[in-house]
Image: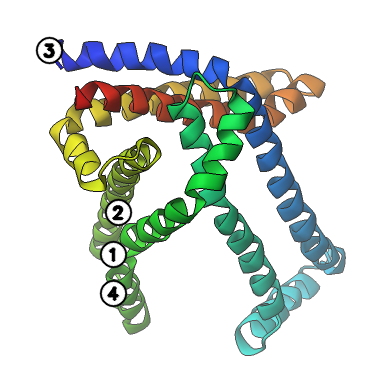
Amino acid sequence: MKKGWWKHMLDSMRYGLTVVSRRSLIVLVLFLYEMVWGFILYRYVKSVVLPLLYRYPGTEAPDWAMLYWIEGEFRLLKTDLADPYLLAILAILAGRMLLTPFINAGLYHAVHQVSIDQWRAFITGITNYWGRFSILYVLQMLISWAPLAWIIPSFTGSLLSGTLGTAQLLDYGLLLLALLAYICLVRLAFMYIQFAVTAGESWFAAVAAWLRSLFPVLGLSLLILLLAMVTQGLISAASMWRAGLTALILYQASPLLRIFFKMWEISSQHDLWTKIRK
């Protein structure tokens, strides 16, 4: 990488946009996939929440409203009322997690094989790499959330003992920010490992390339994240300003934008990875 790293970042971002334009059908399919999962979760939550709202007495009967909340707290804490609902939500999330490695395998292969027809590349990626991507996904989840094995017992211990003060809350807030930064680093490391898998190269070489160019890798992802946040903020502001059908269309377009920026990041990072290897 003889040029400045910022120049490589911008070049990779431009190339990433080109890849996304060539893979527009995959973006649309992933958007529909997100919409289906969102609809399933929405319908289930609605079926649970609406009957509870019908029983709420309202503010016109404050005594009855207080009894409603007391009864709800008692039934949640002292009975197994919530167990079936929690299990159903966990089953929905588990189903999504099981499908995620398949989606990633097709997506990364389609980004790597730009010259091949997008749908054929996507299906070929799922067929050839779903096993290795599943192993990587499990490893990524274990490594990403391993610090919670220490944070959660420490937090619950302080909470139950009554020693959780303002200073400790601040410390746990900083720990949470550090955990988010750590998860982002792990995600980028596994992104480069998945690039290596689709290219038939060594995982360790991919991690070494990631570490060797950590600043441009992080800068590229942060720049795309900033653009995504600005775009989402503009859409939210426009939907508040133009209420009605326009706001609804803008709101429904949010998942599409999220998928667009995700694929843009992966495509740009893949181009940066190819430059690092040279």
Task: Compute the Cα span from label 2 to label 1.
Answer: 8 Å
Work out whether mark 4 precedes mark 2 in sequence or the reverse, and give the earlier one: 4
- Looking at the rendered image, the disc whose residue lies closer to the viewer, 4 or 2, is 2
- Looking at the rendered image, the disc whose residue lies closer to the viewer, 4 or 3, is 3
Q: Quadrant of the C terminus?
A: top left
Indicate the position of residue 183 as horizontal and vertical percent values.
33, 50
Task: Compute the Cα span from label 3 to label 1.
Answer: 38 Å
Q: As drawn, is 225 to the left or to the right of 68? A: left
- Looking at the rendered image, the disc whose residue lies closer to the viewer, 3 or 1, is 3
Residue at position x 55%, y 48% in the image: 102
Indicate the position of residue 139 as horizontal and vertical percent values.
36, 60
Q: Report the residue that reaches farthest toward the bottom.
A: 78
Task: Compute the Cα span from label 4 to label 2.
Answer: 15 Å
At label 4, counting other C-alpha atoms closer than 10 Å, the crowd grade (few under 14, some 14-19, many 20 or more) is few
Q: Which residue is mark 3?
A: 2
Q: Which residue is mark 4?
A: 154
Amino acid beneath label 1:
Pro
Amino acid beneath label 4:
Ser
- Looking at the rendered image, the disc whose residue lies closer to the viewer, 1 or 4, is 1
Residue contact between numbered discs 2 and 1, judged by CB atoms under 8 Å = yes
Work out whether mark 2 precedes mark 1 in sequence or the reverse, and give the earlier one: 1
Quarter of image, res 86: bottom right
At label 3, counting other C-alpha atoms closer than 10 Å, the crowd grade (few under 14, some 14-19, many 20 or more) is few
- How many numbered marks does the figure carry? 4
Q: Which residue is mark 2?
A: 179
